[in-house]
Structures are given as C-alpha cells and as structure tokens.
Amino acid sequence: MPLTPRKLLPSSSALAAFDAVARHRSFSLAAGELSLTQSAVSRQVAALEDQLGVALFERTSRSVALTDAGRAYAGAVEPALGRIRQATLQLLTQRPANVLNLAIPPTFGTRWLMPRIPGFVAAHPTITLNFATRIGQFDFARDGLDAAIHIGRPEWPGAECRFLMGETVAPVCSPDFLARHRISKAADLVGLPLFHMASRPGAWGQWFEGAGLAAAADGGMRFEQFALVAQACIGGLGVALMPLFLIRAELDSGQLVLADPREVDSPSAYYLVAPSFAQAGPALTAFSDWISREVEVDRAGTEAPTQA
C-alpha cells in the first residue's frame, strides 16, 4: 500500500492521546490529563494504531506497556508535541520576546526570589517580568504563562523541569514554647502539637524516621500557607517542620528557635519548569541562566565557614 500524506500525518488528538498514555503507562491517567473518558482515549489510540498499521502498546488486564515500535515512536512524538505547544503558546499570547510571565509559589517568591530580582532587572533592563502566584501544576497555554517555579518532584506533564535547589528542614518553635516544654531529644517531640503543611505531606514521619523513631505524626493542625504556619509557631502554639532557608529572618531575630537540631533533606525540591527550554525565548533563557547563578551564590554563602 502506498504511503499517502494522510497516513504520514495522524490527527493531533490521536497523537496527544498516544503521548499521554505512553508517558503515564495508563489509559485512565491519560484520560484524566486530557479531560476525556478512558474509552475516548482508547479509541484515539486504536485509531492511530489502525492508521499506522502498527501495534504501539501491549495491553493486559492489569497493565499497559509500549511495544518496541511504540517506544521509538513516543521518543519522536513527545518533543514534537512540545514544540507545537510552545509555538501555539507564543502565537496565542503574542507576547514580545522581552516579556516573561512567571508563576511562583508565594513564600518562595516573597522570601527568596523577590529580594534578588533587582539584580536581574539591573542586568537585563530590557526584559519585563510579570509574576503570578500559583501552587501546583497548571496549563501554561490556558493561563498565559511562560514558566513556573515548582516545588515538589520533577513531574509536570507536557513540560520540562530544571532542578534549582533542594531544601533542608528542621523542627522549629517559639522560645516561649520551648521554655514551657522540656525538649532535649527527638523523642520529646512525640505528643506535642505538631503542625503540618499541605505541600509537604509525610514530612514529620520522614523526620522521625531519620531520628530512629517509629512515631505516628498524623495529628495536629494543618496549613496550606507557609505564612500561617510561621505565625502559629511564633504564637507559641506548637512545632513545625520548616525549610530553614525560608525562615532565616525569624531564626536570626529569635522569633523562632530550633526545637531539635536534627536537620533532614526534604523529598521536595525547587524546579524551573517550562513547556520547552530548547524553544525558549531570550527572556526565559536569560532568567534561567540568572536564577541558576543565584542558586549557586546562595549555596556557596550558606556553606561558607563562619568567620570568627
């Protein structure tokens, strides 16, 4: 059978369905990402396989796996779709090349990024930065955003994640709380009011495990906003497991103190995320280079020995 233009150019909906299933290894997860029913995704993939005359997946009652042909095809389709998304984003937004619309988590933006932004503006006076507050994943094209600072794991469908920094956490409380509760070892925290952050589920369990304790840490107040957790600690209501680089001011001023000196690396980290860095405009490229240098400078300053 001769190859026709139609056979060589499958529909974008079929390719998007194939790409989502290939990444998730699941029709149900792909359906959730695409806001379609599982049967609709299955029909799109089946139509693509029929059009190509090649089996792309091996299906069982419990799993979905790429065939060798499917794996090779996925490796070519995913970056191609990424370039199409980026081109569409640029066309829809019609933003000048010197404008960067950036999504940032509120606390990271306020406490770490914004104090450094004057340095970026001085170095790149022709670039305009626009900021939006976001927590969690979103659709770049729909929200009209070019990039995001993401805290969590390097998992963002249809986008690329560049590692910026990890974070170290330790239990903190107010001096008054520490004076009212005898805390001399990690086990003394068991039974005290422990605060939890929605963005870091299971953090206390990991900290206790690092201290050699199998302590249950499910009870206690839960917060979505970092600022509320900090204020609850300052108010003497309990103990929170906090990223140390975000509470340097409170520790330096004495508003907060370490309830226990044990520090652990958080499973969460910070990433710069964009639909495609290879297709990035000059504004995103400049910002990516700049923030990477700022992270290195900050890390060097943190690790430098204290002068007597």
Image: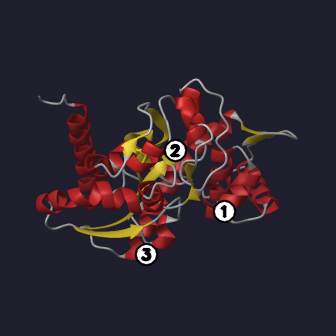
| Element type at mark 3 | helix
Left or right? Give the position of 42 relative to 230: right
Q: Which quadrant of the view contains residue 281?
A: bottom left
Q: Examine the rendered structure and indicate whether residue 85 appears above or below residue 49.
A: below
Mark 1 touches mark 3? (CB < 8 Å)? no
Residue lying at 63% horizontally and 38% vertically, measured from the top left: 71
Depth check, mark 1 against mark 3: the one in front is 1
Q: Earlier in the sequence, mark 1 or mark 3?
A: 1
| Element type at mark 2 | loop
Q: Which residue is mark 1?
A: 34
Q: CA distance from mark 2 to mark 1?
A: 21 Å
Image quarter hosting the C terminus: top left
Q: Which residue is mark 3?
A: 92
Tell me which amino acid carries mark 2: Arg
Residue lying at 65% horizontally and 33% vertically, measured from the top left: 215
Depth check, mark 2 against mark 3: the one in front is 2
Q: Which residue is mark 2?
A: 153
Residue 100 location, x and y as percent?
A: 30, 66
